[in-house]
Image (cartoon, rainbow, N blue to C red):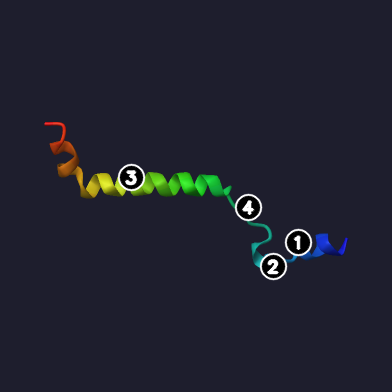
Amino acid sequence: MSKEDNNEELRPRKMRGVAFPKAKYGVILAIIIIIVVNLVYYKETIFSFFK
């Protein structure tokens, strides 16, 4: 039982009630943000390949 109690105490007291999203959703969100930002910055270069 002491191991279970120690695992529960790893997060700070104020953060225990916060539900964190799964890590895979963060990775997917980061990839989407990177793609969108690159599309905005390099829009002219990307569309010049299709002409």
In the picture, the disc for residue 8 is 1
SS label for mark 1: helix
Q: Left or right: where does residue 45 sit relative to residue 25? A: left
Q: Amino acid at mark 4?
A: Ala
The first of marks 3 and 1 along the sequence is 1
User: Tag 4's secondary structure?
Assistant: loop
- Farthest-out residue, bottom: 12
Residue 13: horizontal and vertical position, in percent?
69, 67
Mark 4 nearby-residue class (10 Å; few <14, some 14–19, many ≥20) = few
In-image side of 24 versus 35 (left or right): right
Instruction: Mark 4 or mark 2: name the one nearer the start of the chain.
Output: 2
Q: Residue furthest right?
A: 1
- Asked whether the beta carbons under mark 4 and mark 2 sit within 8 Å of each other, the answer is no
Q: Which mark is residue 48?
A: none
Which numbered disc flags the more N-terminal residue, 4 or 3?
A: 4
Marker disc for residue 13: 2
Mark 2 or mark 3: name the one nearer the start of the chain. Answer: 2
Q: Position of residue 4 (x, y in %)?
A: 82, 59
Q: Amino acid at mark 2?
A: Arg
Query: Which residue is depicted at the point 48% across and 48% down?
Result: 27
| Above-or-below relation of 9 to 46 | below
Contact between marks 2 and 1 (CB within 8 A): the answer is: no
Q: Picture coordinates of residue 44 (x, y %)?
A: 15, 43
